[in-house]
Image (tube, rainbow, N blue to C red):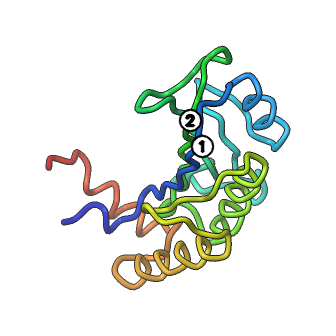
Amino acid sequence: MNFDDLHEVEEVILQAGSYRACKTLWPLLLELGYTLRDDIFSINRAKKPPTPIWQTKTLVSVYIHFDDSEVYSLEDRWNSISLKYLLATQPRTGISMFTKHAADLAGRLSIPLVYKGNEVTQDRLNALFEAIADEVTEQIAEPGSEDLAIVIESTYPRYR
């Protein structure tokens, strides 16, 4: 099985044209509603309705990089941000919320959204993620469903 077909994680990149200071990024992320926990900024899904145990509680996770290394200190510099969305383990309703958060952050930083090497708009990203969700539903089960979670769980441990 090609595990990429499960679409557990979709990643959007914000690539700055130059190095920037983390001391200005951190307050912006907090202002936009992200929380910092265990060195990762994230936004969680709404608490109501309660999240089933097989679904992720995280809507978007933010990984900050300086070239190829992750950045964890306010004193560091950064030049790219990876926004991760766990498509398979939450309902489709999260797609539009994720793309809005991604576009808001990109807009505030004046950096384009890049998905799989291509610059995209919020609307295009939303359409791409919806198409992926359709594909996953057709081939396996609806994103966020217990059935899909069972299929994903059955693929571990993975040996490539």
Q: What residue type is labelled 1?
A: Ala
The residue drawn where x is 67% and y is 56% is 102
Question: Which structural element holds mark 1?
Answer: strand
- Residue 81 placement (x, y as % from top left): 57, 42
Q: What residue type is labelled 2?
A: Asn
The residue drawn where x is 68% and y is 18% is 74
Q: Residue 88 carries which label?
A: none
- Residue 33 placement (x, y as % from top left): 81, 42
126 to the left or right of 13: right
- The image shows residue 74, relative to residue 98, as above or below, that is above
The residue that mark 1 highlights is: 16
Instruction: Count numbered badges in the picture.
Output: 2
29 to the left or right of 6: right
**Where, by quadrant of the figure, is residue 124 drawn?**
bottom right
41 to the left or right of 1: right
The residue that mark 2 highlights is: 79
Query: For this rendering, which residue is in front, 52 or 16?
Result: 16
The residue drawn where x is 70% and y is 52% is 106
Nearer the N terminus, badge 2 or badge 1? Answer: 1
Query: For this rendering, which residue is in front, 120 or 40?
Result: 120
**Where, by quadrant of the figure, is residue 67 drawn?**
top left
Check whether the beta carbons of the residues at disc 2 and disc 1 lie within 8 A of each other: yes
